[in-house]
Image (cartoon, coloured by chain):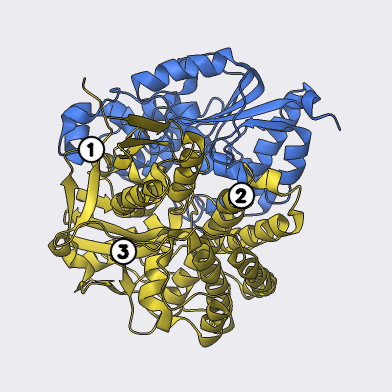
Chain colours: A yellow, B blue
Amino acid sequence: MATKTIKVDYLARVEGEGALDLTIADGKVTAANLRIFEPPRFFEAFLRGRGYEETPDIVARICGICPIAYQMSAVHAIEAAFGVKVEGQLRALRRLIYCGEWIESHALHIVMLHAPDFLGFADGIKMATVYGDMVRTGLALKKAGNEVLRVLGGREVHPVNVRPGGFHRLPTAAEMAGLAETLKRARDDAIALTRWVADFPFPDLEMDYEFVALRHPDEYPFNEGRIVSSRGIDIDIADYDSAFEERHLARSTALHSMTRERGAYLVGPLARYGLNFDRLPPHVQDLAKEVGLGPRCTNPFRSIIVRAIEVVFSCDEALRIIAAYERPEGAFVPLAPRAGTGFGCTEAPRGICWHRYDFEPDGTIKTARIVPPTSQNQASIESDLAAVAGTMVDALDDEIRHRCEQTIRNYDPCISCSAHFLKLTVERQ
Amino acid sequence: MQPTKRPRLAVWKFASCDGCQLSLLDCEDELLAVADAVEIANFPEASSAISEGPYDLSLVEGSITTAHDASRILEVRAQSKYLITIGACATAGGVQALRNFADIDDFVAAVYASPQFISTLATSTPISAHVPVDFELQGCPINKVQLIEVISAFLAGRKPAIAAYSVCIECKRRGTTCVMVQGTPCLGPVTHAGCGAICPAYRRGCYGCYGPMESPNMAALAAEWQALGASPRDLKRALTTFNAAAEPFRKESEAHGD
């Protein structure tokens, strides 16, 4: 029996540390395993005993790329537990800071990490020698997203301004006006970027995903909504455990999030877009149609176009929020701690980020549970890998390896996030 | 331009959130210029082209939390002319050093259903506990302007211009009214400058993410906090976050109860 194993020992252009093992036996892929060797950091353990006020600052440190996602899921969970609802302009400002994170995170991935795969470069910097204008456009976009984070959050990485109930400080009218100017240019850049990436050569691959995302009655989702799926899940975020579970697979010691009824599912841009296309403004829908996207996209390689569309939407939404902004009376809604349980689920750039906290009467955390996006996508990443490698088993190892790495990068996986709860693989001979 | 003569830069990751190495990619205006001035020889988060060492300058993010990483840092040091730690994890052990004050088996069991699969050390330690370090850039996260300054200084063979005073000086320079005077407990008086005093400008107390300044007066700070009505637990919590294992913060936090 001809068996060969292809290994990628250190995945490049992903956030965090991971590796891939692929086994091909008799012309068939028999195993495609994404290994996470990012050291665990035990956030859920050391959150026990901490105060609710310091929670947004602590959970931000799970991920330097998407700290707002962790802060937002945490403050929503805290407010739910204490019976407080943040509405109006404060709610809008939360959407605005989230727009900044989507723009910054997506632009980084599109231009510096993902586009080089399609154009045959090792990285965005080398790609700039040929496509300098587009790399500079992408970096300008990323900078615009970071400017939103800097104004609303105080800084780009681990913003300091988010607190339970709202913010420590409200933006000034002058700051908002400055942001609007930046975002108008960014919006044009994002449209140009969308048209550019839409012309990349994409491998043919259609996958049969179960999409999972938030769905809100009126909005493309950031902070609120029900958890829905393309195969009928439609639940309150508090009921996450009724529809999803974390399973051990015999061939892997990594925890995989699965739907209880069916198995692998997909979160992130493809799922969000596929489940919420009708929530995009008409002109963003038109742009999607113009670049050849239908109301849903199941080719993971084309996720780069969907990310670009989401950047256009985020610039647009940020401009809408700024135009409608009226300074609220206070920077935050006062809240008093009480014993209870709270859930938060928001749309990180890579998909839903789910939190649950139990609190003591004084607001001290009793237990914490956090489910980040990349861990939920692990099973889908592995089925993509098996499908991709299955079509090219006779190719050279290097070609298979390259295409598999590209397949993983389609997900913009954030392994630093996932590793605080993913199991590490230990081989026992 | 002769590419082969450019200094060779490497970026390494240990236990961390990736935020400090992201700061390099966040230099949107300087990134292409940096890539011209140095050869980015090993930066897996940004490039799949990895060239072998030795390297002129290694930037190290993250702390040491596994036996494997404890041996990997020795290899990194051996291949690097200069080694600079970037951020609170690499410099002080990071937020994951909270395990140092707890029972690691309890921590593992709290997060993982099958603790036997987890191989981890009982402590999270800074890079300097394992190998000699040429410069430590503090911050959670680091300041990207300071990062560019440190890279430039090492490439020019000079000392980086990184001030060792407290956040208070930055507040004065920024023209921010002292929040302590207004009744808000703040770690600014004992915290290393570098962030630009963001928190007080955002109407909250500094939470110490840049770690201790040189020779902080921790006792005076504790007394001020107490005078403002902060409980021992408040101070203990504030000191046990991202630089909990840094000596002055650790010592003072252990003097205050829950």
| Most foreground residue, A198 or B26 | A198
Secondary structure at numbered mark 2:
helix
Quadrant location of the C terminus of chain B in the rendered image:
top left
Which image quadrant for residue B38? Answer: top right
Q: Is residue A238 above or below residue B132?
A: below
The three-letter code of the residue at mark 3 reads Tyr
| Most foreground residue, A285 or A336 | A285
Instruction: Quote the CA–CA distance across marks 1 and 2.
Output: 31 Å
Quadrant location of the N terminus of chain B in the rendered image:
top right
Q: Earlier in the sequence, mark 2 or mark 3?
A: 2
Secondary structure at numbered mark 3:
loop
**In the rendering, at what x and y percent does residue A82 appear?**
23, 66
The three-letter code of the residue at mark 1 reads Ser
State whether residue B195 appears in this view.
no
* Same chain shared by disc 1 and disc 2: yes
* Same chain shared by disc 3 and disc 1: yes
Q: Are marks 2 and 3 in contact (CB under 8 Å)?
A: no
| Most foreground residue, B223 or B33 | B33
The three-letter code of the residue at mark 2 reads Pro
Q: Which residue is identified by label 1?
A: A252
Which image quadrant for residue A276? Answer: bottom left
Q: Earlier in the sequence, mark 3 or mark 1?
A: 3
Kindly identify which numbered label has been placed on residue A116.
Answer: 2
Q: Which residue is identified by label 3?
A: A209
